Image: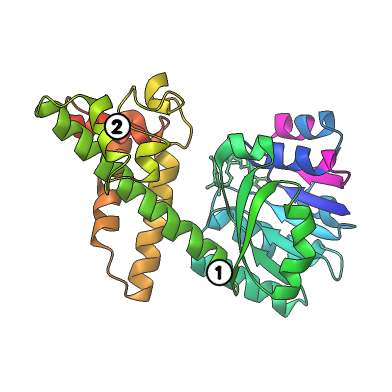
C-alpha cells in the first residue's frame, strides 16, 4: 500500500521502518532532518512537506507529540485534510485528548475522509519490535481497512468503538497504571521501614491479592524484576514526562465527563512533583525514589 507517514520521531521512525519491511511504500515527513534521513536509510522516501508526503497515499499515518500538533497538521493551512488524496484512510496514532481526536475526526468526515484514532502502548521497544498494542476508535469499515497495515507494526489490535474511543482506552489504561505504580511504590517503601526484604515482599505479593503488572513486570524497587528500569538507574522505558502528560489528559477528560477520579488526580499531582524535581526524563517507576524519601533524586 502507498502510505504517507507524518511524525518520524522515537515511535514513528521505527513504526515506518516496520511498514517498509512489510513491503509498503512509505513517503514521510518530519520537521527534523535526522528523522527524514533515517526514513530514507530504512528504504522510505523523504518528502519536503506534509502535503507532499500524502498526495498519493492510500493511507495516512500520523505520530505527533500532542493535540495541538495533530490539529495543526490535519486542519491547518496546507494541512492533510486539504492535501490527502480522495478516499485515503487517515489514522492518527499520537496520544492526544479525546476532544481534539473527536474534533479532527469530525473535520475529516466533513471533507469526506474516514479517520481513526489509534494510539499505542508498548513504547519505543514495542515500536522497534513491531509488537505494539493499538487501541482504535472509528468506523468498523475503517478499522477493517487499517488492520493489515497496523498488523505490520503491532501484535494486539483492538477496535474500542467510535471516534475518540481509542484515546479514551489509552488514558483509562495509563491512569490505572500510574495509580498502581504509586501503590506498589508505597508498599515497597513501607516494607523497607518495617524491615521486610523487597525480594520477600515480592515473593509473597506477586502471588497474593496485591499482585499487579506494575509489580510483577516493572517492579519499582530494584532487585525482584531484573529487566525493570529500577535496575538501570531508572533509565526510561516510559518517561515520567509522558506519564504526567497522560495523567493530565485523563484528568481533563474526567472533568469534562463528570467522572470521579480522586486517585487519578493524586497520581497526576505526585508525578508533577517528580517532574518538578528534575526526573521527567527518567522512567516513571522512579516515583519510588520520591516516595521512599530523600527527595526526587
Ligand atoms: P517524538 O517527539 O520522538 O516524535 C514526534 C515527532 O513529530 C518529532 O520527530 C517531531 O519533529 C515531529 N513533529 C512535530 N510537529 C510536527 C509537524 N508539524 N510536522 C511534522 N512533524 C512534526 O515523540 P514520540 O516518543 O515518537 O511520541 C509520539 C506520540 O506517541 C506521542 O503522542 C506520545 O505520547 C505517544 N507515545 C509514545 C510512547 C513512547 O514510549 N515514546 C509510547 C506510547 C505512545
Which secondary structure lies at badge 1? loop
Quick check: is 24 in the magenta stretch? Answer: yes
On residue 120, which mark appears?
A: none
Q: Element type at marker 2?
A: helix
1 and 2 marks in contact (CB < 8 Å): no
Camera-side residue: 122 or 208? 208
Q: Is residue 146 above or below residue 274?
A: below
Residue at the spot 77% in from the left edge and 37% down from the top edge: 17
Q: Position of residue 222 (x, y in %)?
A: 33, 23
Image quarter (top left, top right, bottom left or bottom right) of the N terminus? bottom right
Name the quadrant of the C terminus: top left
Ligand 1: quadrant of the figure: top right
Coordinates of residue 273 in the picture (x, y in percent): 26, 40
Q: Residue at x 76, y 61 (%)?
A: 146
Give the alpha-carbon distance from disc 1 to disc 2, as whole Å: 40 Å
In the image, residue 26 lies at what x, y percent?
Answer: 84, 45
* Vertical relation: 78 (above or below) 183: below
Say whether disc 1 or disc 2 marks the residue closer to the N-terminus.
1
Q: Residues within 10 Å of mark 1 (few under 14, many from 20)?
A: many
Q: Residue at x 76, y 44 (%)?
A: 29
Q: Which mark is residue 203?
A: 2
Magenta span: 20-37
The percent coordinates of residue 191 (x first, y second) are 16, 31
Q: Answer yes or no: is residue 158 visible.
A: yes
Viewer-proximal residue, 42 or 104? 42
Residue 31 in view? no
| Residue 30 versus residue 235 in the image, above or below | below
Label 2, ligand 1: CB separation under 8 Å: no
Splitting the image into 4 quarters, where does residue 9 fall?
Answer: top right
Front in this rendered view, residue 64 or 211: 211
Residue located beneath label 1 in the image: 164
Amino acid at each position: 500500500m502507498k502510505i504517507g507517514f507524518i511524525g518520524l520521531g522515537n515511535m514513528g521512525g521505527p513504526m515506518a521502518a516496520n511498514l517498509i519491511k512489510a513491503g509498503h511504500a512509505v513517503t514521510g515527513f518530519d520537521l527534523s532532518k535526522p528523522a527524514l534521513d533515517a526514513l530514507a536509510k530504512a528504504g522510505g522516501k523523504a518528502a519536503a512537506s506534509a502535503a507532499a508526503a500524502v498526495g498519493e497515499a492510500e493511507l495516512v499515518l500520523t505520530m505527533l507529540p500532542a493535540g495541538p500538533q495533530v490539529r495543526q497538521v490535519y486542519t491547518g493551512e496546507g494541512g492533510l485534510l486539504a492535501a490527502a488524496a480522495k478516499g485515503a484512510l487517515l489514522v492518527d496514532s499520537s496520544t492526544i485528548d479525546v476532544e481534539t481526536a473527536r474534533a479532527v475526526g469530525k473535520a475529516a468526515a466533513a471533507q469526506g475522509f474516514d479517520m481513526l484514532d489509534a494510539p499505542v502502548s508498548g513504547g519505543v521497544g514495542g515500536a522497534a519490535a513491531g509488537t505494539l498494542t493499538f487501541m482504535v476508535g472509528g468506523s468498523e469499515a475503517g478499522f477493517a481497512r487499517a488492520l493489515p497495515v497496523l498488523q505490520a507494526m503491532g501484535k494486539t489490535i483492538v477496535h474500542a468503538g467510535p471516534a475518540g474511543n481509542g484515546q479514551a482506552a489509552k488514558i483509562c489504561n495509563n491512569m490505572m497504571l500510574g495509580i498502581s505504580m504509586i501503590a506498589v511504590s508505597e508498599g515497597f517503601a513501607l516494607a523497607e521501614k518495617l524491615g521486610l526484604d523487597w525480594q520477600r515482599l515480592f515473593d509473597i505479593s506477586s502471588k497474593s491479592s496485591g499482585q499487579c503488572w506494575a509489580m510483577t513486570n516493572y517492579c519499582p524497587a530494584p532487585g525482584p524484576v531484573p529487566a525493570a528500569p529500577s535496575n538501570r538507574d531508572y533509565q526510561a522505558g516510559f518517561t515520567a514526562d509522558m506519564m504526567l502528560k497522560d495523567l493530565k489528559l485523563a484528568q481533563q477528560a474526567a472533568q469534562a465527563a463528570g467522572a470521579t477520579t480522586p486517585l487519578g488526580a493524586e497520581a497526576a499531582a505526585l508525578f508533577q512533583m517528580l517532574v518538578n524535581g528534575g526526573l521527567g526524563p527518567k522512567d516513571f517507576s522512579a516515583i519510588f525514589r520520591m516516595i521512599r524519601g530523600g527527595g526526587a533524586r
